[in-house]
Structure formats: C-alpha cells, structure tokens
Image (cartoon, grey):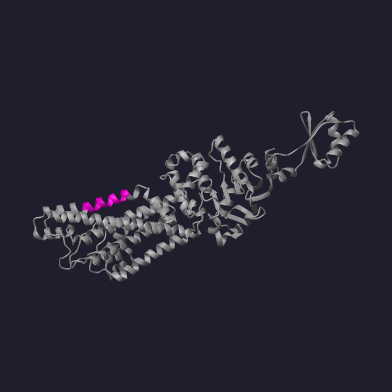
Amino acid sequence: MSSSEVVLRTIGLSKRYGHLLALNEMTLEVHSGQVYGFLGPNGSGKTTTISLVLGLIAPTGGHVEMFGLDTRTHLSEALHRTGAVLEGPSFYPLLSGRDNLRVCGALSDGVDEKRLDEVLDLVGLQARGRDKVRTYSLGMKQRLGLAAALLHDPELLILDEPTNGLDPAGIREVRHLIKGLGQVGKTVFVSSHLLSEVEQMCDHVGIVKEGRLLTQGSVTTLLRRGEVLEMQVTDPDRAVQVLGGLKWVDAVKREDDHLVVDAPRQRAAELSRALAEHQIYLAELRPRDSSLEEFFLEVTGEEQAQS
Amino acid sequence: MLAAELLKIRKRWMPYVLLLAMAAILALHIFLAGYLTWRNADDPFQRQEALQSFALPWSLPAFLGTAQFWGAILLGILVASSVGTEHSWGTVRQAIIRGQSRSQYLTVKLVAMSVVGGIGFSLAFGIGLAFSAIATALTDHPITLDVPGGPSLPEVALMVLRAAYGVLPYVLLAFCLSVVGRSTTLGVAGTLVYVFVEAIVLSILAGIGGHAADARAFFPGHNVSAILAANRIGDVDFFSFAFRDPTRRDLPDPTTAALVVGGYCLAFVVIAFSVFQRRDISS
C-alpha cells in the first residue's frame, strides 16, 4: 500500500438521534502510514464517528470507505484488516485475559498461541494473562483491548480514547506503542480529548466540535498556519508603536521583556529593518509555533467563549 | 467462530448448574413421584399406574415429557443469558468490530446453543434412563422394551427427537426476546411468564369449549402436547411434570402440530435476525 493511499475515508457522514444531530456531514481522510489524531471535546461526535466507521451504528446519511472498499457492501472484509479499541473495552469477565484473546482470535480466523504470548508481552500483561478479566483494573482492561486490537496484525488501528483509565506510566507506554506502530508503517486513527496526547503521538489531526469536522491536516502545517515571531528589543515601548504601524503585522503583544508579533516569518528581515530605521535594535528574534492547544482553542472558538 | 462460542459457554458455571437442576427434577419424578408412590400403594390398580410412571419402558414418554418441559425452561434461561450478557458486558461490539457479520453472529449463537442443547438433552435422557433403570431394578421387574405396544430402539430415538423438538419454540422465544430486549431478564422472565400463562389460557379455552377450544390449535403449547402425545406407549397415559396435558384425546394431528411449532420457531428466528440486523449497537 502506497503512503498516499487513503485507508479510511468518510463521505458526508451524518448521524441523527431524533432531534439531535450527533454528526453533521463528516468528511475526513486518513492516509496510509498516518497516525491521525481525532481531537475534540467530550460529546463532539468522536465515538459516534468511530461507531459508524466500525459498523456498530448505521448512518443517517453519507458512507464510509476503508481500504477503498465501500463498507455498505464490504464491511466484514474491511474490518478483518482493522483492529479497534472502543471506549471502555468489553471482555468476558469469567474468562481469563488469554481466553478472551483466544475468542477474539477465533473471530479473526484463528491466531496461534505464540501470537497470544507476543501481544500479551507487548502490552505488559504476560504475567496476568491466566487471571480472570473480572480481577483486572480498568487500565489492565485497556491494555487487553490494545492486545486484542493488535492480535491479527491489522493494517489499520482505530483507537477510541486508548489511554482512558491508565496511570501516567501506562499512558506513556501506550503513547510510545502508538508512535511505534506509526513508525513501522501502520495506520492509526486515534480519538482523544487530550490535546497534549494528540500533539505527542500524532502526525495528522482532525478537530471536531458539535459533530462537525472543523479542520484537518498535518500537525506541523496546522500549527504554522497562525505564525508568531517572538523578539527581544532595546526599546520595547517604542517597538510596539513602530510594529503596530506596519500593515502586515496583525498584532503586537508584550510578554514581560519580550514582544510577541503576529506576522509571517518570511518578513522577519523587513521587520528588523523597520525597527532599525527607528534606532531600535533586536537582541533576539525567533519564530514561535503556536501549541496545538492554542490552535484548538482558536478553531473551536473556545478561547472567545472562555473570555 | 463456533469454537469461540463453545469456549464461552464451557467456561461458565450456568450450564452445569442447569444440568444438575434437570437431574434433580428427573430424580424427583422417578423416585419420589414414581417409585415411592408405587411402594406405598395398596390398591393393585394404583400400583400398576404408579409402576408405569417410573419403570421402563413406560417411563420413557413420562420422563421425556418432563425433560421437554423443564428443558425448555432451563435451556431458555441459558440461551437468554448467553445473548443478554453479551449486551450487558458489551462484548457483542467485540464480535461486530472484528468483522463478524450480524447474521453470522446470531447464527453462530444458535448453532452453539443447538450443540449445547443437544448435548444437554442427551445427558438428561441418559440420566432419566439410568434413574428409571435403577428404579425398575428395585421393583424386580425386568428391564425391557418388550411389552405390549413397546417401542423399538429406532422408535425410542424418535421419541427423544419429538421431546427435543418440543423444547425448540420456548428456547427460540427466549432467544428472540433477549435479542429484541438486549436483556437476559426479558428473555428469561418473558419465557417463564409465557409458559405458565399459556398453560392457564389453554385450560380456560378448553373449559369454554366450542370455537374457544378450537383456538388452542394456534398455541405452541397445545401443539407441543400433541407431539408429545405421539410418544405414548400403547394406550397407556403418562404423568408429566409439565403444565400441559399430553393425554387428551382432542389434540391436533402430530404432523400438523409439528408444522405449527415449526412456524413459531421460524417466526421467532426471523424477528430476532431482522431486529438485530437493523439495530444500532452502542455501549
């Protein structure tokens, strides 16, 4: 599969529950090899989207394509190439972790004992594999969910809030695991409401709010969309006046002894010259990427709502 | 997929407990209601009637009738639990997201339950046969099929199949209710209520007579009674622990009864599959 190939595509996907429009014409694309973060606040439609993709619920409108297959007619085929962890992983409490994986393996056309050992080892459950799942903590169930998803070595992984219930060490391990999967060419679609998590794990992101996809793209591109230059100058008060007069500067803010200037980074030389013409000299100038959090608040309008 | 389904059932305690319950019911039927009654009876006619309730081969239709009735309830509980807990545990989602189609999911459940039910019913028959043989031996009567109107071995097999067929509509009702209601409770309670209410309604209709009595032909229980009545050895009526009367002479023809029961079974399966096919499965 080439890296440009679309592995997962939703086309105008909508879901209505009575009067509530849970998902509104969601169109997104996940390409092969991407670790795609599906970011949005709680109740924004992330789990609904994943449930629609996995065929658990039926769309009110639109459809899903996986591996180029229309899931309205080829769902089973597509899901055999997919592994998924749903929010709140579900297992048979009376069976051991290993037996639960055996059941999952049988549903995926059979998996040998060696593979069971491998995935249990990978998620750190080898020692507790023979214990009944009812004795597992939420974090252990979450790990078992990951093991079940990886069992048949799928091409696409769909993970709904995979770090829920994990302790900080567990979160770090799962984050590391997901990044590792991306590095070996697996396509990962991971939903989260945690910005830092997506920022650290994902190379692509889609931001969803109130059932709408607000934006999607590579994390680096999205973060560069709103460019900011940070500088230290000899006379900050006069510099604010000078820079404020330039028409291509959107805003100038003072942060302690620094100035934060909203301006394209390719105009840094012009900015320096303008200041020098007023005998103001630069002590430091560097581009500052906005964090995903700032970007998220910006596109979802949360910042305005908060203020 | 079938192996996975059987693994899930095998690892639960419920099938073993239900089998024990069935063994206890058969023991009550053969030893308490049969053998002890025979031993304490003074009247020769009463002794003969009591003997035929537990001694082989006359006991065959009697304990098969009991196995059918209680088997329907116990297997109904197992089926409803097997379907309902998948919803309460959320494990139904695991099956669907691993590429098992919805019709495959329900078909595998039905096939697994048929295997378990078949094994369970065979074991119940074996237990009943063993208890009956022990009780017969205690009376010093010979253990034989060679009595007037006694069945051959293939006929005994047919008797077992008739009784097992009588289990189906109730088990499939439990299956249908638990699929539609996504609940073990609804499957179990619905089936139990139906079994007992149906018995009462059939008695009332029989008491009213006329067209009301004819309406019993539309009830699964009345038709199951007709199928079980075909198990009668000669003209000997038999006692059953069931809330129905397989000794009545106004029962439908067994073939017609089998078709009506088959119709109900089909209806329950079609309802379960069509509802499950279109349903949203959420957490």
Nearest the camera: A69 or A118?
A118
- Residue A299 in the image: state x and y as whole percent: 70, 45
In this rendering, would B36 be left or right of A207?
left
Residue A173 in view: yes
| Rendered residue at 85%/38% (across/down) | A269
Residue B185 in view: no
- Where is residue A196, by image quadrant? top right
Give the extent of the magenta segment.
B16-28
- Residue A176 in the image: state x and y as whole percent: 59, 40
- Residue A191 in the image: state x and y as whole percent: 60, 46
- Where is residue A292, by image quadrant? top right
- Residue B269 in the image: state x and y as whole percent: 41, 62
Nearest the camera: A80 or A243?
A80
Q: How many numbered tags mark residues here?
A: 0
In this rendering, would B173 be left or right of B104?
left
In the rendered image, residue B17 lying in the magenta stretch gets the answer yes
